[in-house]
Image: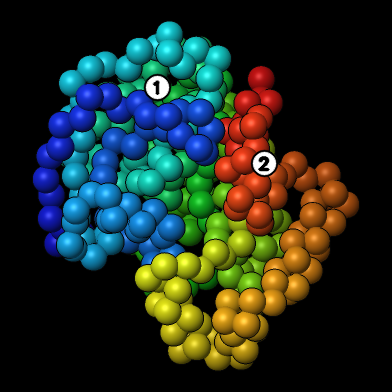
Amino acid sequence: MEKIIVAEKTVESYLTKSKIGQFAINPYVGCPHACKYCYASFMKRFTGHSESWGDFIDIKRARHTINGSQITEKNVFMGTVTDCYNPYEVKYGITHSILEQLVDVDCYLQIATKNKLILRDLDLLKKMKRLSVALSVNTLDENFRRNMDRASTVRERLETLRTLHENGIYTILFMSPIFIGVTDWKAIIETSRSFVSEYWFEDLNLRGGYKNVIMQYVQGHYPDSYPLYERIYIQGDKTPLTEMENEIIAYCHDNDILFSDYFHHEEVIRNPKNKILGKNKP
């Protein structure tokens, strides 16, 4: 594990209202998975951390337990700006303690992660009334994955989805972010169809401090694709993204694949039904 600055932080509750869904739970501040494309790095503006994103983590300690009546029949998303199953969860068990509070609550619970550690809590997850679990997979190339994050390997994530599926849990493969010209989205689907209930697709959204990082990475590792990235992310021509989106949608329709399309980030936030949380699931 990389050298991370660890601190503890007292909060009133783990539960907060959220634009993504209705309620969010983030047991940690920061995330040592350190994804190079992480949109959540904007959180540094509010946390006062001077360290690089991925080099710090705050362990949250809540004064109050979660009020189950507040979230009955509501959408609850675990992991909007951190990964609940980052490596420090092994030591601190904050996510585990939260799941113990939620196990008898009749809410629509969504957990998003990139870590096989979620299988530690399989017995608890199987008791949840309305649960779906999303694992992010945007490549089958382990070298690319290793260059992008410190989370579980591609194989581990796919096997985690398989295990969850085999235990009756609604599984989502969150293909995000899709690197046009790099991510083989069709191969990912065909590799995982037998154990994935639904796919989510999201394009690469370059903004903030990590835009230059990603552009330099593509230029150095995928020079043939770099002109395409310049066209999209420098010149602002989104036509190639729309064409890829339409191809993905057509493929899913033709092959009876259940999916949600999140290529348009602002629409996800505005969506009053919060479909991203699977509230339409039984």
Q: Amino acid at mark 1?
A: Leu
Q: Secondary structure at mark 2?
A: strand
Left or right relative to 281: residue 88: left
Q: Is residue 273 above or below residue 46?
A: above
User: Which residue appears at 79% of the width and 55% of the height?
Assistant: 249
Residue located beneath label 2 in the image: 198
Left or right relative to 216: residue 174: right
Is residue 241 something that shows in the picture?
yes
User: Which residue appears at 30% of the width and 47% of the height?
Assistant: 86
Pinpoint residue 203: horizontal percent, then vertical percent.
Answer: 61, 62
Q: Is residue 22 above or below residue 183?
A: above
Q: Which of these two is toward me, 221 or 81?
A: 81
Q: Which of these two is toward me, 218 or 165?
A: 218
Pinpoint residue 138: horizontal percent, then vertical percent.
Answer: 55, 61
Q: Earlier in the sequence, mark 2 or mark 1?
A: 1
Residue located beneath label 1 in the image: 124
Pinpoint residue 2: horizontal percent, then vertical percent.
Answer: 19, 63
Q: Amino acid at mark 2?
A: Glu
Image-quadrant location for residue 89: top left
Image-quadrant location for residue 172: top right
Residue sitting at the far right? 254
Q: How is the image coloured?
A: rainbow
Left or right relative to 2: residue 252: right
Pinpoint residue 57: horizontal percent, then vertical percent.
Answer: 20, 49
Q: Secondary structure at mark 1?
A: helix
Q: How far is the residue under mark 2 from the one under mark 1? A: 22 Å
User: Which residue appears at 43% of the width and 58% of the height?
Assistant: 39
